[in-house]
């Protein structure tokens, strides 16, 4: 009984140690990002390709925040941004779709990468499916739905 | 917050680094509250034979995803709690690299549903849309990778 408990406990602490090595440096890096307003700058560079899936520069910003910070840590910025910029219903749905499938790319990728899983297989499917799904939403809102009504 | 508008001067000072370090440690402590209990619970489940029973139950379903039955526990702790709980239960099992890859890809697409569905909803996307989207994509990748890696 005690043995089992001990096994579980040491396993758990090993897990915590693995993650501490990812989370602590990551939080330091993210603070530096925030302090330098690097995300606003990055958004200007990253936004153009997002136009192809129907997102303006304002619409792409929450997606960029979510990709770097994640939905939970980024939620404050994401929600206030969506509210302030008065995005269209289509843009809200597209950015929501993209964000749901593809976010916290640094954190989610690193915590599995430390277990020995190749990084590309953690990133490429999420990115590809997010682009495909967003494109499908754009098509639905701009082509399929107008034709139906 | 400093706004580095003018030239590309990078602002890094002790206060920023300390804030990051503090947040990192607080987050790690928060995570340990999830990981350690999950690891202990799954180890007990394993030692009591419960994991084997669950594994047998879920084996047919998990087989579709190219996963052993006990991987259902990893999948559920990731879907319902978060990725850290999933890793907590992974460390309590001996999974093959193939199984870990399939689980990581599936869980990357769909995880922490209790917290994240609420955030998506606040961002303007209803649960009735995001839940089938994420679960569907996750299962799709599971079946695809399961077929490829088996």
Image: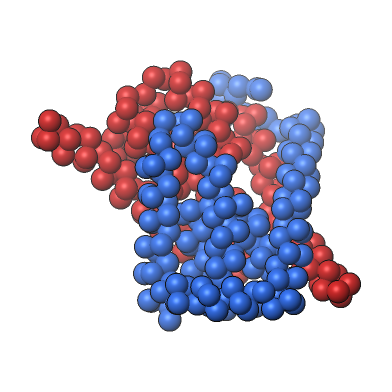
Chain colours: A red, B blue
Q: Is residue A89 above or below residue B43?
A: above
In this view, the residue farthest toward the right is: A2
The picture places residue A52, in percent across and down from the top left corner, at 27, 39
Q: Position of residue B41 (x, y in %)?
A: 73, 64
What residue is rendered at 57% in x and 35% in y? A74
Q: Is residue B139 left or right of residue B11?
A: left
In the image, taking residue A39 as reference, residue A101 lies left or right, namely left
Question: Residue B62 at x, y = what percent?
Answer: 47, 73
Viewer-proximal residue, B92 or B96?
Answer: B92
Q: Quadrant of residue B90?
A: bottom right
Q: Kindly identify the residue that appears in the image at 32 percent across and 48 percent down.
A: A133
Residue A96's image quarter?
top left
**Closest to the observer: B48 or A103?**
B48
| Residue B16 image position (x, y, % from top left) | 74, 32
Vertical position of residue B86 compared to residue A5: above or below: above
Residue occupying image coordinates x 89% and y 72%: A2
Q: Residue furthest bottom?
A: B150
Task: Using the rendered image of the protein, determine whether residue B21 is visible from the camera's viewpoint.
Answer: no
Quadrant of image for the C terminus of chain A: top left
Q: Is residue B27 visible?
A: yes
Q: Quadrant of the N terminus of chain A?
A: bottom right
- Numbered label tally: 0
B61 in relation to A81, above or below:
below
Question: Looking at the image, which residue is at 43% across and 81% down?
Answer: B150
């Amino acid at each position: 009984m005690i043995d089992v408990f001990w096994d579980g406990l040491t396993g758990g602490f090993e897990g915590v140690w693995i993650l501490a090595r990812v989370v602590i440096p990551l939080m330091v890096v993210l603070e530096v990002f925030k302090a330098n307003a690097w995300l606003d700058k990055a958004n200007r560079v990253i936004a153009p390709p997002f136009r192809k899936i129907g997102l303006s520069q304002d619409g792409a910003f929450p997606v960029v925040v979510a990709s770097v910070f994640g939905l939970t840590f980024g939620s404050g910025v994401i929600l206030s941004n969506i509210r302030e910029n008065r995005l269209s219903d289509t843009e809200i749905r597209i950015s929501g779709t993209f964000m749901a499938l593809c976010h916290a790319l640094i954190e989610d990728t690193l915590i599995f990468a430390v277990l020995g899983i190749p990084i590309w297989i953690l990133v490429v499917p999420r990115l590809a499916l997010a682009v495909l799904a967003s494109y499908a939403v754009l098509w639905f809102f701009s082509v399929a739905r107008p034709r139906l009504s | 917050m400093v706004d580095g508008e003018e030239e590309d001067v990078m602002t890094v000072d002790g206060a920023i680094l300390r804030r990051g370090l503090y947040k990192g440690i607080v987050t790690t402590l928060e995570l340990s509250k999830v990981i350690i209990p999950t690891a202990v619970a799954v180890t007990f489940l394993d030692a009591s034979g419960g994991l084997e029973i669950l594994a047998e139950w879920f084996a047919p379903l998990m087989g579709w995803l190219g996963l052993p039955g006990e991987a259902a526990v990893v999948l559920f702790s990731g879907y319902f709690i978060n990725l850290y709980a999933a890793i907590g239960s992974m460390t309590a099992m001996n999974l093959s690299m193939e199984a870990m890859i399939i689980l990581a890809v599936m869980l990357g697409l769909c995880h922490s549903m209790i917290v994240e569905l609420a955030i998506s909803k606040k961002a303007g996307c209803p649960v009735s849309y995001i839940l089938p989207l994420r679960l569907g994509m996750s299962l799709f990748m599971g079946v695809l990778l399961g077929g490829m890696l088996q």
